[in-house]
Amino acid sequence: MQFFIDTANLNDIGEAQQLGVLDGVTTNPTLMAREGISGDEAVRKHYKAICGLVTDNVSAEVISMDYEGMVHEGMLLANIDPKIVVKLPMTAEGIKATRYFSTQGIRTNCTLVFTAGQALMAAKAGATYVSPFIGRLEDISTDGINLIADIRRIFDNYQFPTKILAASARHATHIVQCAKVGADVTTSPLSAIVGLLKHPLTDSGLAQFLEDHRRVNSKTAAVI
Ligand code: G3P
């Protein structure tokens, strides 16, 4: 299973990368705005900086709503760095653009997916990744993990190569649940990735180990 971080924050990306478990980054216009990135040149520079921090897979989202605009914008994004994956919305225009980029050998991430039917459509169009938003489904009291399981079953039935990128994963339990039902990738904030490390029994067990070691070794040091 691959771990992507869902942020445009360079410090968080660097921190996740240093853990040695990061496989990629997803961004969206909200996350870019959160970092105060605006204007074509600033966007280009920021994506270049992100690409410099990670080994591959940097999803960069188009803003255009029409096919021609998406193709133009997506080509500009793809030309920034070979690590860029063009992120396109789940709309009819987005699906047409996904098909176009697929024929050009340019990787795509179809975003804002909330049903298995939408995921099937993205796979048919040749999307590299499909991004079902599990957290936002839970926000409206709908089971996001079931959706991942349904998409897994459909993709396996027909051997679609499209990867399931479980997005809007907000905490460590989401990552584990997605792993159990066979998501290929999760994207989540740094807190969720780091959250996988944590358990209070790990902390108390380690404190006890260190205390026992210190007690015996301080006695030995006193004898010498
Ligand atoms: O990857 C999609 C993600 O950015 C949405 O997350 O937490 O805003 O629903 P969230």
Image: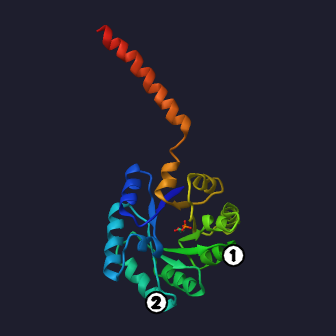
Q: Tag 2's secondary structure?
A: helix
The image position of residue 170, as x and y in percent, is: 56, 59
The image position of residue 51, as x and y in percent, is: 35, 66
Q: CA distance from mark 1 to mark 2?
A: 25 Å
Residue placed most toward the observer, 89 or 156: 89
* 216 lies left or right of 126: left
* 27 lies left or right of 76: right
Q: Please name the residue that numbered disc 1 is placed on.
A: 117
Residue at the extreme left: 224
Mark count: 2
At 37% from the left and 12% from the top, the residue drawn is 219
Residue placed most toward the observer, 87 or 15: 15
Tell me: residue 63, above or below residue 142. Answer: below
The image position of residue 109, as x and y in percent, is: 52, 73
Mark 1 residue crowding within 10 angstroms, few (<14) / some (14–19) / many (20+): few
Position of the N terminus by quadrant: bottom right
The image position of residue 180, as x and y in percent, is: 64, 53
Type of amino acid under label 2? Gly
Type of amino acid under label 1? Gly
Q: Earlier in the sequence, mark 1 or mark 2?
A: 2
Label 2 CB, ligand 1: below 8 Å?
A: no
At 59% from the left and 84% from the top, the residue drawn is 91
State the image quarter where residue 79 is shown.
Answer: bottom left
* Quadrant position of ligand 1: bottom right
State the image quarter where residue 177 is shown.
Answer: bottom right
| Residue 181 showing in the rendered view | yes
Position of the C terminus by quadrant: top left
Q: Please name the residue that numbered disc 2 is placed on.
A: 69
| Residue 28 showing in the rendered view | no
Q: Tag 1's secondary structure?
A: helix
